[in-house]
Image (cartoon, coloured by chain):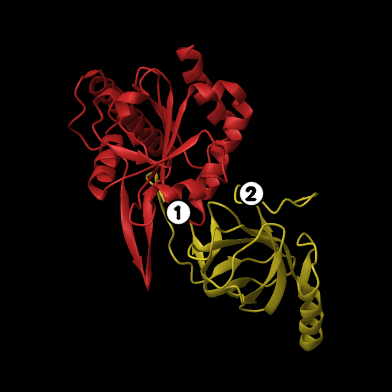
């Protein structure tokens, strides 16, 4: 089953897929995966996504991987006393029956060591590793540098 | 239990009142050199010299006469800075030509990497009314001190990032401090704050 899913996703990532499509992994629904266009490859990119856990088991996003980044990490932007910092997040909790968003100014993936330029309008695959549900690969839409969300037509209910 | 709650509420009320009175006393003083929660200096009293993304030397005295908006950031910042710059771009879009009567600056807290050319490339992705400023580490430090902003280099494995003050500073046309737009401030509140400055200046 897992192989079938992987094969399916590999075929998905081979052809451009609208990133607004929801990808299912057990009771997790992963949608609105997006990133911003980069200037060159020296700066880290950011990765944002919405994860909905419709099940009854708590889960956690433990890591991300993509061929486009030599060192992808999970971070959280924290603004304390007006000062923004970005501590490393070892894992992002995805409690049962809830929706967690990696979004600007909060949890986000940081794509360090880019292996290619992120070009607006293109997509790239990111594999999310969950503690309970395992791995899933989703297509990530590269939006403009000034974008603030995935730009999906009917976002969030 | 309830009595205790009331007592606590009462005590904190007195505390808040004392704080407000204290703040009033403190704000009414001319010099802002002491205390821990300092407000930015008026622009007229700022003394730094920076270079804009077009390579031109900039001093704050040139800003007097127009309302001013300043944000501290750096172009290697993956999350907060593009988000704030896109917020600012959206505010400017909403304000339309009114915003032409403002000074809008991004001050880099990472002059090591943010040269004028790097800032120019980066800012070409946002509203053209935003001017990037960089300079020597000493002048950046002086600017941050005068704004009462802070920044700190945070080493990572083979790299570093910067912690920095995230709010957007506002100043009236005469250079007096005009408030802060907090990170994650509601868009309408942000617009009202800017419009108030523009209205006072017209």
Number of dots carrying numbers? 2
> Which residue: 37% across, 54% down?
B163
Counting from the top left corner in percent of width and height, residue A75 is at: 50, 64
Residue bearing the label numbered 1: A78
Tell me the number on the disc at residue B23: none
Report the chain shown in red: B
Report the chain shown in yellow: A
Q: Quadrant of residue B36?
A: top left
> Which residue: 72% across, 68% down?
A139
Of A30 and B82, nearer the camera is B82
Counting from the top left corner in percent of width and height, residue B44 is at: 27, 23
> Which residue: 66% across, 51% down?
A149
Same subunit, labels 1 and 2: the answer reads yes
Q: Quadrant of residue B53?
A: top left
Q: What chain letter is assigned to the residue under label 2?
A: A
Left or right: residue B13 versus residue A148 is: left
Asked which secondary structure carries label 1, the reply is strand
Residue bearing the label numbered 2: A147
Left or right: residue A107 versus residue A133 is: left
């Amino acid at each position: 089953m897992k192989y079938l899913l992987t094969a399916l996703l590999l075929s998905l990532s081979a052809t451009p897929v609208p990133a607004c499509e929801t990808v299912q992994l057990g009771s997790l629904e992963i949608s609105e995966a997006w990133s911003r266009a980069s200037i060159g490859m020296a700066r880290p990119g950011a990765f944002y996504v919405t994860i909905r856990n419709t099940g009854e088991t708590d889960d956690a996003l433990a890591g991300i991987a993509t061929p486009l980044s030599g060192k992808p990490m999970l971070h959280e932007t924290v603004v304390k006393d007006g000062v923004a910092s970005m501590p490393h997040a070892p894992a992002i909790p995805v409690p049962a029956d809830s929706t967690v968003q990696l979004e600007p100014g909060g949890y986000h993936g940081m794509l360090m060591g880019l292996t290619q330029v992120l070009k607006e309008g293109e997509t790239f695959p990111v594999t999310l590793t969950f503690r309970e549900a395992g791995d899933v690969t989703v297509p990530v839409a590269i939006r403009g540098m000034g974008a603030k969300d995935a730009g999906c037509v009917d976002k969030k209910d | 239990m309830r009595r205790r709650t009331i007592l606590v509420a009462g005590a904190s009320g007195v505390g808040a009142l004392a704080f407000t009175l204290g703040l009033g006393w403190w704000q009414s003083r001319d010099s802002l050199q002491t205390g821990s929660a300092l407000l930015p200096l008026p622009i007229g009293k700022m003394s730094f010299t920076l270079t804009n993304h077009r390579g031109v030397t900039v001093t704050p005295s040139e800003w007097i006469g127009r309302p001013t908006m300043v944000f501290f950031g750096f172009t290697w910042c993956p999350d907060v800075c593009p988000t704030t710059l896109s917020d600012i771009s959206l505010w400017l879009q909403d304000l339309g030509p009114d915003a032409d009567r403002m000074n809008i600056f991004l001050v880099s807290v990472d002059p090591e990497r943010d040269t004028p050319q790097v800032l120019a490339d980066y800012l070409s992705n946002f509203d053209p009314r935003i001017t990037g400023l960089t300079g020597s580490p000493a002048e950046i430090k002086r600017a941050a001190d005068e704004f009462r902003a802070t920044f700190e280099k945070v080493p990572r494995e083979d790299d570093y990032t910067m912690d920095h003050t995230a709010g957007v500073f506002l100043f009236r046309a005469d250079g007096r401090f005009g408030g802060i737009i907090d990170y994650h401030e509601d868009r309408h509140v942000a617009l009202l704050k800017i419009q108030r400055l523009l209205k006072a200046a017209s």
